[in-house]
Image: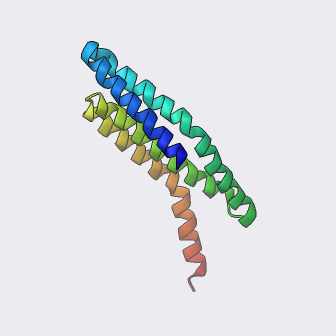
Amino acid sequence: MVELIKVIGLAFVVVVAVIVVKQVKPEIAVLVGVAGSILIFFYIIDLLEQVFGVFSYILDSTGLNSELFIILLKIIGIGYLTEFSANICLDSGNSAVASKIMLAGKLVIFVLAIPVIKSLIDIIVSIMP
């Protein structure tokens, strides 16, 4: 909870900085927003490391297929990275570029999901009489 409050506080500082800079130098405001977003991302990397530690523990404890688990983590990461990048484009007024980033992210996720889908189909086929 404390981490979230810190992130929200940092986000508010970034938003105020963007508003102030936009009044003085509008062309730099987007860069301030991107820099602030990157700072927020670096702040939450510690939280992500904790999440990956828990996932690693679950993987080691259960003996689940690590390849499929890694694919799922990649899919989650690509989803977040795609959304982050598309939102930066939207904030700068480039909705066409944002929609292409979203399309590319969806396609990459689909390609990565193919082995997972194949594994599920193999399981279903193996239990069918």
Please say if 60 is above or below 16.
Answer: below
- Asked which quadrant contains residue 16, the reply is top left
Q: List the single residue furthest toward the top.
A: 25
Relative to 60, is 28 above or below?
above
Q: Determine the residue positioned at 26% across, 35% down.
A: 95
The percent coordinates of residue 66 (x first, y second) are 68, 56
Q: Is residue 23 left or right of residue 62?
A: left
Image spot of residue 54 (x, y percent): 66, 55
Q: Nearer the viewer, residue 88 or 11?
A: 11
Q: Is residue 92 above or below residue 61?
A: above
Q: Is residue 41 left or right of 127 when viewed as pictured? A: left
Give the quarter of the image for residue 120.
Answer: bottom right
Where residue 122 sits: x, y (%)? 58, 70
Q: Residue at x 57, y 51 (%)?
A: 73
Which residue, as the protein is rendered here, is positioned at the far bottom? 129
In depth, the one of 68 and 122 nearer the eye is 68
Residue 1 image position (x, y, % from top left): 52, 50
**Residue closest to the eye, 5 or 69:** 5
Which quarter shows the C terminus?
Answer: bottom right
**Count of all numbered marks drawn on residues in the image:** 0
Residue at 32%, 20% (x, y): give it.
29
Task: Give me the residue at 45% from left, 52% from top.
Answer: 110
Color style of the picture: rainbow
